[in-house]
């Protein structure tokens, strides 16, 4: 026992010595602002190395804010989230080697669907015009898979609650930025609304990915808040809830209110539609009594439609939803006159049409993973020369880039993810069930908004990977207790 204590003391002295050398060297060599940044970042890394779970919390915060200091590598940028994800995984491997003298990884249920999709996407490299673009997209999915495996293997009840708390803090901070931008008209002129406000975009440069990021957290916050509020009316006395759980429940309520307001201020129709479906699924999954809430919501929707028909709802609201049904039709954009009212719909349809043309010409392996924008000029329709980076429908985008095989692998992966999330909902109770229902809602919001956009940007694929890992942990914890 004394030997163990001495070893820990020696390790602590080494960390202190390294920190002292780092501070002294940075202050001598670098200007003061750069020295502060380098020392702060390095000390944070040392703290993460000493207390590994700090790297997880730093990564969660880096997802929305990591793009502030990108490092260009030609085909794209590396962000703090990329470095922290790699650091987190390296710490895990190093800890396994140091403690167990071996690398033992338990593969969670989605490992096989992930592997199939990654293999098909990698096979499409053989037809890719740009290997750099293909590798960039493939690495993003590899990051998602790696963090899924990490979360499944490393989470426990305490780490899960703390991680959820950091998710809520990150979401609420982004909401505060968006509300400020909306209220004080901070942003580019193109985001102006009604000559009085500004579309909220947070740190994501565009309103749609900003709304998409909030949509990855709101269902989880809603699930926790719904459970926290309703649990106080159940036969189980509320004082039996742990203090940390009380704090998490209150934080979820506050964060939910802020994020919903910011989501509305983003003026993103795809996110609104996805969030409506996600919240319904989240509440229905948690409680049989939730059908009452769904019925009330249906009545409210009917009332809104009725009031709209009587012109009792402001025009700017009805106009925002007026063209939503156009997204569910199919037409040839070459014969459609374009105006301000239908521009967004026609633009997306033009990119969907191009994706379909790519798939028709390359049905088996597509044009290469990540190569939609590279191949776009050869397929561009008249008046639509800008590829916009993706097809504005991720399933069509995957089909165009990886062919029929990639599209089927993609559907298999998300079908399995929904099934695992549903298993977690049905097999858990209390807070774990609330979290599982929230992740299920997150997947629904992701799939719905990805029907109009691409949310696997700005490191958001890492957030999705951690959400799937939470589901795997909840299922394993349930199986272990049975």
Image (spheres, grey):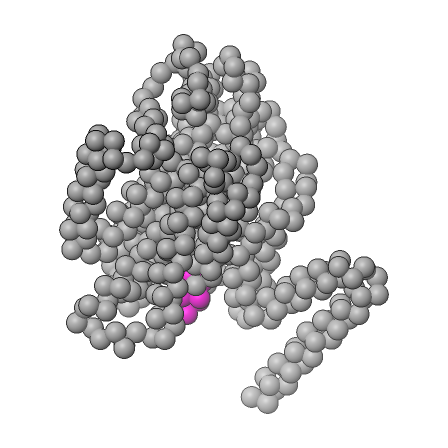
Q: Residue at x 62, y 48 (%)?
A: 68
| Dominant secondary-structure state across the stretch colored magenta | helix
In the rendered image, residue 188, in percent from the top left (x then y), is placed at 57, 37
**Residue 219 seen in the current view:** yes
Is 235 on the left or on the right of 172, as rendered? Answer: left
**What segment carries the magenta color?**
157-164
Is 388 on the left or on the right of 344, as rendered? Answer: right
Question: Among all residues in the image, which is located at the extreme right?
Answer: 28
Q: What is the quadrant of residue 286 in the picture?
A: bottom left
In the rendered image, residue 455, in percent from the top left (x then y), is placed at 46, 40
Q: Residue at x 53, y 32 (%)?
A: 190
Q: Nearer the viewer, residue 464 or 368?
A: 464
Q: Residue at x 35, y 40 (%)?
A: 272
In the rendered image, residue 439, in percent from the top left (x then y), is placed at 35, 52
127 lies above or below 196: above
Q: Quadrant of the C terminus?
A: bottom left
Q: Is residue 445 magenta?
A: no
Q: Nearer the viewer, residue 91 or 15?
A: 15
Is 475 on the left or on the right of 142, as rendered? Answer: left
Q: Nearer the viewer, residue 462 or 108?
A: 462
In the rendered image, residue 480, in percent from the top left (x then y), is placed at 31, 66
Question: Among all residues in the image, which is located at the extreme top?
Answer: 335
Question: Among all residues in the image, which is located at the extreme bottom?
Answer: 2
Q: Residue at x 60, y 47 (%)?
A: 67
187 lies above or below 368: below
């Amino acid at each position: 026992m004394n030997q163990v204590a001495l070893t820990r003391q020696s390790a602590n002295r080494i960390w202190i010595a390294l920190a002292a050398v780092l501070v002294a060297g940075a202050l001598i060599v670098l200007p003061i602002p750069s020295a502060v940044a380098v020392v702060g970042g390095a000390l944070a890394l040392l703290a993460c190395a000493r207390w590994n779970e700090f790297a997880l919390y730093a990564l969660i915060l880096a997802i929305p804010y990591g793009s502030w200091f990108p490092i260009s590598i030609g085909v794209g940028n590396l962000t703090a989230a990329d470095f922290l994800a790699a650091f987190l995984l390296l710490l895990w491997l190093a800890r396994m080697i140091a403690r167990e003298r071996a690398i033992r990884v338990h593969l969670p249920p989605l490992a096989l669907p992930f592997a199939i999709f990654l293999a098909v996407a990698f096979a499409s490299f053989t037809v890719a015009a740009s290997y750099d673009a293909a590798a960039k997209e493939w690495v993003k999915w590899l990051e998602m898979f790696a963090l899924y495996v990490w979360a499944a293997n490393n989470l426990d009840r305490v780490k899960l609650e703390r991680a959820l708390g950091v998710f809520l803090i990150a979401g609420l901070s982004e909401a505060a930025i968006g509300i400020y931008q909306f209220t004080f008209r901070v942003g580019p002129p193109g985001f102006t609304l009604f000559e009085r406000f500004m579309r909220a975009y947070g740190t994501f440069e565009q309103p749609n990915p900003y709304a998409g990021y909030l949509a990855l957290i709101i269902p989880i916050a809603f699930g926790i808040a719904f459970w926290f509020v309703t649990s106080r009316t159940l036969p189980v006395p509320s004082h039996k809830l742990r203090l940390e759980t009380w704090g998490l429940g209150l934080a979820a309520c506050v964060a939910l209110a802020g994020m919903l307001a910011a989501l509305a201020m983003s003026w993103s129709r795809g996110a609104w539609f996805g969030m409506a479906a996600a919240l319904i699924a989240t509440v229905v999954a948690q409680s049989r009594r939730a059908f009452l809430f769904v019925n009330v919501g249906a009545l409210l929707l009917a009332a809104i439609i009725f009031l709209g028909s009587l012109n009792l709802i402001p025009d700017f609201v009805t106009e925002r939803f007026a063209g939503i049904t156009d997204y569910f039709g199919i037409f040839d954009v070459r014969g459609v006159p374009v105006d301000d009212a239908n521009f967004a719909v026609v633009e997306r349809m033009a990119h969907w049409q191009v994706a379909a043309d790519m798939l028709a010409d390359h049905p088996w392996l597509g044009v290469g993973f990540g190569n939609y924008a590279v191949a776009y000029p050869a397929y561009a329709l008249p008046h639509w020369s800008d590829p916009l980076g993706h097809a504005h429908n991720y399933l069509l985008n995957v089909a165009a880039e990886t062919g029929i095989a990639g599209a089927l692998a993609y559907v298999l992966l998300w079908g399995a993810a929904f099934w695992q999330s549903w298993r977690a909902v049905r097999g858990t109770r209390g807070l774990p069930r609330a979290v599982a229902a929230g992740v299920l809602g997150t997947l629904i919001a992701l799939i719905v908004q990805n029907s109009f956009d691409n949310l696997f940007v700005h490191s958001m694929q890492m957030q999705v990977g951690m959400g799937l890992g939470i589901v795997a942990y909840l299922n394993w914890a349930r199986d272990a207790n049975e």
